[in-house]
Amino acid sequence: MSWGIPKNDWDTDDVIATTDLNRIEENAITLHKGNGQAALASITAANNMDINETDETFLVTGNTSIFFIKTTGRQAGNKIILIFSGTTMLWTNKENVPANYANIRIKKLWDGTGGPSESNISVYAFTSIELIYDGTHWILIS
């Protein structure tokens, strides 16, 4: 696999084609392996997601679930990006948070009953999300 030039002229009418998904996957793998580009930290989460203190972008491999994300070395305002190669269930507001971890807060603006709510979500392969640490929780922001 090799590095493919990312598409940077997306239009609102564009549809993601198979070739786009293949390029995105190959680029993520190339970044993970290191190829003169910035390397991604690769992790396989299994309930508790262990991230290092310095990286900001992580490739989450396989099909898994994430209950908590490590906070060691993180300060309020730190952001991380997770890129997924498989289907992952993100659990919100789980109880019994282990030391040096925080739970994930996923807010929906409308829950069908007139107000905001929280719920678990499935994240699929070739998806990326951004989270911000507020000093207590990891908050889904995009």
Image (spheres, rainbow, N blue to C red):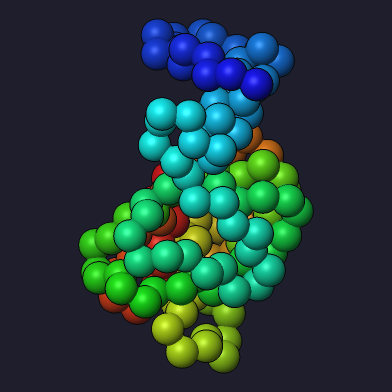
At a point 59% along the width and 74% down the height, the residue shown is 48
Q: Position of residue 102 (x, y in %)?
A: 45, 77
The answer to which of 52 and 9 lies nearer the viewer is: 52
5 up-or-down from 47: above or below = above
At a point 39% along the width and 37% down the height, the residue shown is 38
Q: Position of residue 35 (x, y in %)?
A: 48, 29
Q: Position of residue 31 (x, y in %)?
A: 50, 34
Residue 115 showing in the rendered view? no
Quarter of the picture containing the C terminus is top left
125 up-or-down from 139: above or below = above
Q: Position of residue 97 (x, y in %)?
A: 52, 86
Horizontally, residue 124 falls left or right of residue 28, namely right
At a point 67% along the width and 42% down the height, the residue shown is 85
Quarter of the picture containing the N terminus is top right
The quadrant where residue 24 appears: top right
At a point 63% along the width and 28% down the height, the residue shown is 25
Horizontally, residue 101 falls left or right of residue 123, namely left
